[in-house]
């Protein structure tokens, strides 16, 4: 038999009641919050798993946002390319139509006006911006126009979005992929005469406006004005000499690899070798090109007394806009220009090449979007799964908790009643 | 007849004593520490007559208290254990809640920040996305700082608690000393046990054991000597020593507990304090709070350092190489603050190697001067890591093992070693990351969101090799604001590895410096065209191979400007470098570096081995901290429950032996009252006998 002290009887009843109350409080908290785990100490391993799962969910949710973002960009690109295709189809129709001989020059010219409009439209399309203000075809140079005139000034970098742990998806399509580096174009049959220069007067150097046809790194060709006459006599040497616009400083020089023999062939108006008149070394003839105003401002004495035509042969780039430009030019839209049948016919093939590349790019975008779709579905599956396991880890089983609560309630009530009875028992009541 | 009278009187006296003791028991029923008493009754010496020995009644021999010494001892032990666990649990609960609470948890803050990075990387030209990331930089720092502040508060709170406990210990010890003296006086004057004083002393010892574990050794049955912890004398007879809690000798921010003896000499007893609230608090500080602070600090420092490293590899909207996103982890005041014992008063700091943040430990160290040799130990467990002849050797060791150096706290990369004379006699505490969470803040160099460097160098999509080019991070000691200007990227030709010749790495022993030089020469020749391959713009003779990070740094002429680049992600096999692979410097809308920044979220940045395996990400490390704290809290919760019920049992045992039972006392009351009444009847009988006699002879 164990001896009980009076204090002990009170204390043990009290202790049991406070214990039950504290457990009830815990159950009550769980019922209120709906969480089985209120602090990590309740289940440390589950708590850490929960944190990791939440991090995963956050990462995957961000990846899903990336998918949406990429998809939005790709859709925009795709719709622009769709419009480009429509325009190209129209141009191709025109080329096929006008390629036959039944059309008069005026008819061709008037159709050319429409072609020119389409060109303008295309020039606008390639400089499309998205809502962040990015020129979508400019690659990583998207803070400025993808095309300046007909020349591409972006780069080929296509930014990638992380759409799954190890899956990166290109969310942009560079103009380099869609419109540049076309091969097999026929656009160089007719060099365009840029301007004619007056005879050189050392006292008053003349200048010629190149009208934006040339830019850094481009080749231009000079031709002696008397060339036609010489060709007629069929004894002249190759009348073209290439010159390279080297830098923004505008100094003209022979392109690398020009042999002395070619330089030597530079002749004056009277068909005399003017080599000895040119300043040494050969590769700096003293021509000055001002990139800012696109003007030549001086000639060396080499050109003394001669009349020189200035031509730019490389004004057409291997890209979509130049191909269309060539087609428009071939239609003779410009003042005093004549339609060029050869050019129109070449344009049929040219436009096909362009169309081919654009539609190929479009289907690449479609493929990317398909992948995005698949990735998104799998991301969403994961999210669902993760949320379920999160719920298993931390959410409360209400049925169990309510049963527990009632048990605790009963046990507390019983304790209280017992306490009341025990407290009333005393021998002092009877003496 | 007179015999009968005196017999009755002894009975009367004894019963009255018994009744008094019962009354004393009843009135002390609720007195803490009271042990029930009883009067020991014995027969008086008999009186020999011819008819035999005649009894001479009874007397009260002594009043004794009913105690079980074993139970008394057990009560103290169990009280100490419970209070230890309770004090630990109280503090651990707070930390546990702080770490897991959605609104304060650092994991959530990191996730939010990296979401911002992703959005900005997706859309590098978008001002709102950049602004979001910019302000997320502030908000994540804020979260780390406020978590650090909460833990620092807790640490200060512990200091206050230690001081309060010390004072309470002193009060109780003084009281016990006084009672020791009183007991000696009382016992001496009556030669009877002063029961109530014993109870009082035992109760005070029990109260003392609530604060600290005590070892009570009785001395000649009167005095007790009290030792705390592992045999530290607190009370010896009437001589009482004192405890004091004072700013620590290694770290002023963490209080030490000293024992001060009568002569005023002090002894640090930190490590010998066990049990009781004081022990629980000390245990919490060493086992839970300090590791949590260190781990949080490490997460912050690795995060800031690695994010900066990556950020410097990119290019911002102004076309400049990225600078620090977060404040440089080796800012002067940061380095000085990592030596808490010196507190910026002298040139001593800790420099973290931003190239080797994966080695950074969440630990603290102590350097001791052992007569000209310097011993490095972990703190507080004191595991010896090595003894070094000078600071340079020590730093070589810590840098290669732990990625930090103990320096003079000046600028430099790394700064000069700390003067060995800075080490005080008691040792120098090195805390590389303890306050790291407070050192996370957005760099002032990042003055606007244009300076967030999101673009970088992008490889061509058709590249066959794995090698990656990045801008080489500006070294830490670059003056504020000096950043490498990068040229307009449109006119820059791509970097191009035409005809790279594979280098057989196996033929070089990278532990041999001479071989590393040979390897560098080979790299140089492969890049500059000596062997027929050319990296456009490569500056001859600049390739440096870093054997630990396995990266090549090199100078390339980009349009007339020399740019320092880094090649990484290769193993020198032919597949890594493929002839003709090319890389382009991105424009403003490039997101290469943004993707690199975002990838840090899942990279195993902490404790990754040099070969790139193992380790865990920032988020995982944080989860592990939460888990560890959770386990500790949950363990201490269980331990508290267990020790509480153990104490309850012991209390029951004590109560069972020493507690007062009302019914028992009521019964005693009746019994002794009846005895008393009976004794009066004896006296009355004696009187009547006397009367009878008188009447019969008086006639």
Image: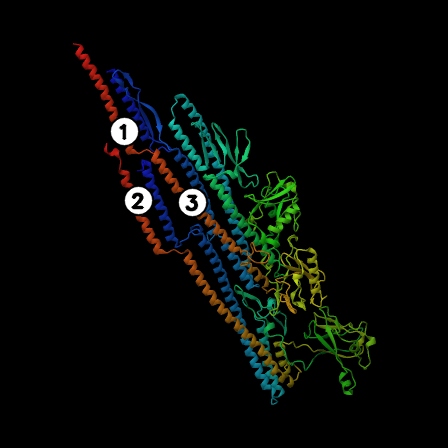
Q: Which mark is residue B639?
A: 3
Does the rendering let one see residue A331?
no
Q: Quadrant of the C terminus of chain B?
A: top left
Disc 3 crowd rating (10 Å Cα; few below 14, some 14-19, many 20+) is: some
Disc 1 crowd rating (10 Å Cα; few below 14, some 14-19, many 20+) is: many
Q: Who is closer to the viewer here, B469 or A323?
A: B469
User: Residue at image x 70%, y 59%?
Assistant: B518
User: Residue at image x 41%, y 22%?
Assistant: B188
Q: Which mark is residue A415?
A: 2
Q: Quadrant of residue B358?
A: bottom right
Do marks 2 and 1 both belong to one polypeptide chain?
no
- Measure the C-alpha gap from mark 2 to mark 3: 25 Å
Residue A186 appears at what percent x and percent y? 65, 81
User: Residue at image x 46%, y 46%?
Assistant: B92
- Measure the C-alpha gap from mark 1 to mark 3: 44 Å
Do marks 1 and 3 both belong to one polypeptide chain?
yes
Q: Who is closer to the viewer here, B441 or B550?
A: B550
Residue B403 appears at what percent x and percent y? 61, 51
- Measure the C-alpha gap from mark 2 to mark 1: 31 Å
Q: Who is closer to the viewer here, A330 or B642?
A: B642
Disc 2 crowd rating (10 Å Cα; few below 14, some 14-19, many 20+) is: some
State the count of labels. Answer: 3
Q: Which residue is mark 1?
A: B669
Q: Nearer the viewer, mark 2 or mark 3?
A: 3
Residue A27 appears at what percent x and percent y? 36, 51
Mark 1 lies on a secondary structure that is helix
Chain name for mark 1: B
Q: Quadrant of residue B63?
A: top left
């Amino acid at each position: 038999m164990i001896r009980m002290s009076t204090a002990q009887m009170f204390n043990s009843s009290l202790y049991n009641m406070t214990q039950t109350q504290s457990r009830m409080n815990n159950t009550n908290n769980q019922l209120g919050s709906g969480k089985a785990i209120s602090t990590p100490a309740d289940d440390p391993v589950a708590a850490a798993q929960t944190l990791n799962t939440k991090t995963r969910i956050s990462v995957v949710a961000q990846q899903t946002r990336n998918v949406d973002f990429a998809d939005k960009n790709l859709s925009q690109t795709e719709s622009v390319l769709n419009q480009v295709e429509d325009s190209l189809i129209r141009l191709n129709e025109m080329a096929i139509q006008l390629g036959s001989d039944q059309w008069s020059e005026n008819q061709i010219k008037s159709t050319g006006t429409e072609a020119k409009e389409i060109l303008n439209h295309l020039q606008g399309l390639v400089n499309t911006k998205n809502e962040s203000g990015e020129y979508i075809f400019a690659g990583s140079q998207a803070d400025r126009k993808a095309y300046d005139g007909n020349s591409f000034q972006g780069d080929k970098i296509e930014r990638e979005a992380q759409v799954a742990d190890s899956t990166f998806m290109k969310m942009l399509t560079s103009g380099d992929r869609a419109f540049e580096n076309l091969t097999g174009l026929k656009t160089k049959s007719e060099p365009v005469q840029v301007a004619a220069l007056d005879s050189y007067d050392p006292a008053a150097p003349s200048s010629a406006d190149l009208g934006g046809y040339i830019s850094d790194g481009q080749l231009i060709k000079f031709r002696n004005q008397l060339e036609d006459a010489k060709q007629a006599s069929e004894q002249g040497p190759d009348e073209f000499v290439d010159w390279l616009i080297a830098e923004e400083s505008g100094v003209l020089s022979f392109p690398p690899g020009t042999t002395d023999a070619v330089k030597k062939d530079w002749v004056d108006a009277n068909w005399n070798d003017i080599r000895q008149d040119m300043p040494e070394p050969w590769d700096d003839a003293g021509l000055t090109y001002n990139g800012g105003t696109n003007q030549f401002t001086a000639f060396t004495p080499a050109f003394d007394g001669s009349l020189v035509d200035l031509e730019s042969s490389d004004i057409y780039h291997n890209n979509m806009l130049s191909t269309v430009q060539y087609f428009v030019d071939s239609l003779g839209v410009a003042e005093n220009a004549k339609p060029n049948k050869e050019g129109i016919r070449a344009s049929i093939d040219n436009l096909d090449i362009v169309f081919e590349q654009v539609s190929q790019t479009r289907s690449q975008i479609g493929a990317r979007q398909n992948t995005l779709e698949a990735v998104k579905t799998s991301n969403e599956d994961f999210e669902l799964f993760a949320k379920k396991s999160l719920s298993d880890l931390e959410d409360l089983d209400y049925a169990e908790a309510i049963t527990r609560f009632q048990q605790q309630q009963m046990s507390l009530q019983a304790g209280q009643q017992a306490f009341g009875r025990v407290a009333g028992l005393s021998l002092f009541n009877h003496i | 007849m007179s015999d009968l009278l005196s017999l009755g009187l002894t009975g009367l006296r004894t019963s009255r004593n018994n009744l008094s003791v019962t009354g004393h028991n009843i009135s002390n029923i609720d007195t803490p520490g009271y042990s029930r008493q009883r009067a020991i009754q014995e027969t008086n010496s008999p009186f020999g007559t011819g008819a035999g020995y005649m009894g001479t009644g009874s007397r009260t021999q002594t009043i004794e208290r009913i105690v079980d010494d074993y139970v008394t001892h057990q009560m103290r032990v169990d009280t100490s254990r419970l209070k230890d666990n309770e004090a630990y649990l109280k503090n651990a609960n707070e930390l546990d809640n702080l770490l897991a609470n959605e609104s304060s948890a650092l994991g959530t803050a990191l996730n939010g920040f990296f979401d911002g990075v992703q959005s900005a990387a997706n859309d590098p030209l978008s001002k709102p996305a950049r602004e979001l990331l910019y302000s997320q930089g502030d908000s994540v720092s804020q979260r780390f700082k406020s978590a650090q502040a909460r833990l620092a508060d807790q640490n200060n709170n512990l200091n206050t608690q230690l001081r309060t406990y010390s004072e309470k210990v002193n009060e109780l010890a003084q009281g016990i000393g006084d009672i020791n003296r009183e007991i000696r006086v009382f016992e001496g004057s009556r030669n009877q046990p002063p029961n109530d004083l014993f109870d009082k002393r035992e109760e005070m010892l029990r109260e003392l054991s609530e604060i600290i574990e005590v070892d009570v050794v009785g001395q000649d049955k009167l005095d007790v000597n009290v030792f705390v912890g592992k045999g530290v004398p607190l009370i010896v007879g009437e001589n009482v020593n004192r405890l004091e809690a004072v700013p620590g000798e290694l770290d002023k921010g963490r209080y030490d507990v000293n024992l001060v003896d009568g002569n005023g000499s002090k002894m640090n007893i930190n490590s010998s304090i066990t049990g009781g609230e004081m022990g629980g608090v000390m245990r919490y500080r060493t086992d839970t709070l300090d590791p949590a602070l260190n781990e949080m600090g490490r997460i912050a420092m690795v995060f800031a350092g690695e994010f900066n490293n990556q950020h410097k590899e990119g290019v911002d909207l102004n076309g400049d190489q990225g600078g620090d996103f977060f404040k440089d982890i080796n800012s002067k005041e940061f380095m000085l603050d990592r030596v808490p014992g010196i507190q910026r008063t002298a040139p001593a700091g800790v420099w973290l190697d931003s190239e080797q943040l994966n080695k950074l430990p969440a630990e603290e160290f102590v350097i001791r001067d052992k007569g000209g040799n310097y011993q490095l130990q972990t703190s507080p467990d004191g595991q010896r890591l090595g003894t070094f002849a000078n600071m340079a050797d020590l730093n070589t060791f810590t840098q290669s093992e732990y990625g930090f150096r103990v320096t003079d706290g000046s600028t430099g990369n790394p700064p000069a070693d700390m003067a060995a004379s800075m080490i005080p006699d008691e040792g120098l505490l090195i805390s590389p990351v303890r306050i790291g969470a407070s050192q996370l803040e957005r760099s002032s160099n990042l003055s606007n969101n244009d300076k967030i460097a999101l673009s970088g160098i992008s490889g061509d999509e058709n590249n066959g090799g794995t090698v990656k080019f990045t801008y080489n991070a500006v070294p830490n000691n670059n003056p504020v604001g000096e950043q490498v200007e990068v040229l307009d990227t449109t006119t820059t030709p791509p970097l191009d590895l035409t005809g790279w010749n594979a280098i057989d790495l196996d033929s070089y022993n990278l532990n041999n410096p001479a071989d590393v030089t040979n390897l560098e020469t080979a790299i140089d020749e492969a890049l500059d065209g000596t062997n027929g391959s050319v990296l456009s713009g490569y500056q001859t003779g600049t390739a440096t191979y870093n054997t630990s990070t396995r990266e090549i740094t090199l100078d390339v002429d980009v349009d007339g400007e020399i740019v320092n680049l880094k090649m990484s992600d290769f193993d020198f096999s032919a597949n890594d470098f493929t002839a003709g692979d090319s890389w382009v410097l991105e424009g403003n809308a490039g997101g290469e570096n943004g993707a690199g920044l975002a990838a840090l979220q899942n990279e195993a940045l902490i404790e990754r081995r040099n070969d790139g395996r193992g380790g865990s990400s920032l988020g995982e490390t944080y989860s592990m901290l939460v888990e560890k704290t959770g386990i500790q809290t949950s363990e201490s919760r269980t331990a508290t429950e267990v020790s509480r019920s153990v104490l309850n049992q012991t209390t029951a045992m004590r109560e069972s032996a020493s507690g007062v039972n009302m019914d028992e006392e009521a019964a005693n009351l009746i019994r002794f009252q009846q005895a008393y009444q009976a004794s009066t009847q004896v006296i009355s009988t004696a009187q009547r006998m006397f009367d009878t006699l008188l009447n019969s002879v008086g006639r």
